[in-house]
Image (cartoon, helix red, strand yellow):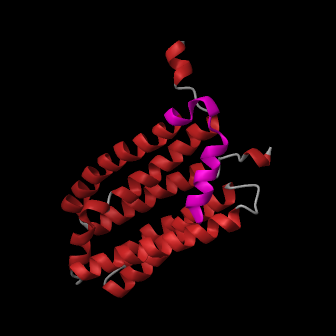
Amino acid sequence: SKARGRFKMHRQNKLFLAMFSFFVLAGAMLGPIYAIFVKEIGGDILAAGSAWAIFMIVSGIGILFMGRLQDKFKSNKNFIIWGYLFTSLAYLGYFFVSNVIQLFLVQVLLGVGEMIVVPARDSFYTKYLDKKKMASQWAAWESLWFIIAGIAALLGAFIANKFGFKSLFLTMFFLSLLGLIISTQLKDKNEH
């Protein structure tokens, strides 16, 4: 009973972590083998680095502006859904990539998804935290990310090795769709 109380978390954050898990699982499948995919479509080390830079810079600049915009809204749910919709579409976009320019465009789409979802996602999770258990509840999110990403790295490498990158991208897309479906079930505090 005491142990159960220690790990008690608001139902919305449990639902949130389930949703987040599917997106981490989907996204982290490609990470460690990303450069191999870039090489397969005719890119080199510079192309791999440039593609990653595009994603990071679009995300970083966009997150700053989206955070300010989202401060004006009471609800985060729609931003979470839209951000993850763009992310899912980017994962599907990888399936159709056959050259570096197309990859760069998908990276922009992925960055747009990230810039929309990150401020809303962080704000949503924070609203439901138990103020006396902030460290442990943030630790639940962060440890989940590391564990799921580790599993995803192995799973993604296995799928790409056994069935090819196309199968990997479809797997990423379908896993992200499960997360997207869960995101529609979130209830923002301001919706009640």
> Which quarter of the picture shows residue 147?
top left
The residue positioned 31% from the left and 69% from the top of the image is 166
Q: Is residue 182 positioned above or below 176 on the image?
A: above
> Which quarter of the picture shows residue 99?
bottom left
Prevalent SS, magenta region: helix
Q: Which residue lies most toward the top here? A: 1
Q: Position of residue 118 (x, y in %)?
A: 55, 59
Q: Nearer the viewer, residue 12 or 162?
A: 12
Q: Nearer the viewer, residue 143 or 19?
A: 143
Magenta residue span: 116-136
The residue positioned 56% from the left and 35% from the top of the image is 134
Check the picture and name the quadrant holding the C terminus. top right
Q: Is residue 58 positioned above or below 22 on the image?
A: below
- Image mark count: 0
The residue positioned 22% from the left and 84% from the top of the image is 42
Residue 124 colored magenta? yes
Left or right of residue 45, residue 119 in this image? right
Left or right of residue 163, residue 174 in this image? right
Q: Position of residue 12 (x, y in %)?
A: 63, 40
Left or right of residue 147, residue 68 in this image? right
The residue positioned 60% from the left and 45% from the top of the image is 125
> Which quarter of the picture shows residue 167?
bottom left
Q: Position of residue 68 (x, y in %)?
A: 67, 66
Residue 177 colored magenta? no
Check the picture and name the quadrant holding the N terminus. top right
